[in-house]
Image (cartoon, grey):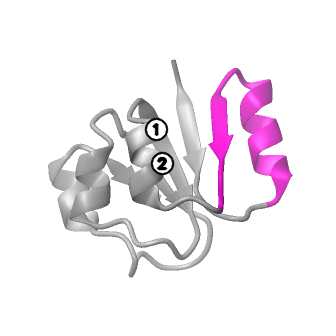
Amino acid sequence: MRKVLIPTKLDSVAATLLRERDFTVVQDANASLAELAEAHPDTSALIVRSEVVDVAVLDAFPQLKLVVRAGAGYNTIDTKHARRCGVDVM
């Protein structure tokens, strides 16, 4: 299963496009990343805005392969740890 987690407010067009391409999409701007990781450990991609994606978050998603930053810069993402975990950051 290819699950994309969007833990932020983001226009629904992203989720719609992903669902049309057979991705399972979970969008929840009200729960913390820790809560979402516990509920969806099979997440393979995250789409974030200003959420902090640190070591704890990266380690909480064992199947994570991709973090997409919907915005500019990677200052809220631990790109070095992501690289060590085999997670691409875009």
Q: Position of residue 36 (x, y in %)?
A: 48, 48
The residue closer to the viewer here, 10 or 30, is 30
Q: Position of residue 13 (x, y in %)?
A: 84, 49
Task: Report which residue position mark 2 lands on.
Answer: 36
Q: Is residue 48 left or right of residue 84?
A: right
User: What amino acid type should be assigned to the residue bearing mark 1?
Assistant: Ala
Q: Magenta segment range? A: 11-29
- Relative to 43, say whether 2 is above or below: above
* Residue 25 occupies quadrant: top right
* Residue 79 occupies quadrant: bottom left
Q: Is residue 17 left or right of residue 69?
A: right
Q: Which dot marks residue 39? A: 1
Name the residue at 56% across, 78% down. 72
Name the residue at 56% across, 45% down. 5
Q: Is residue 46 magenta?
A: no
User: What amino acid type should be assigned to the residue bearing mark 2?
Assistant: Leu
Q: Secondary structure at mark 1?
A: helix
Q: Is residue 77 left or right of residue 86?
A: right
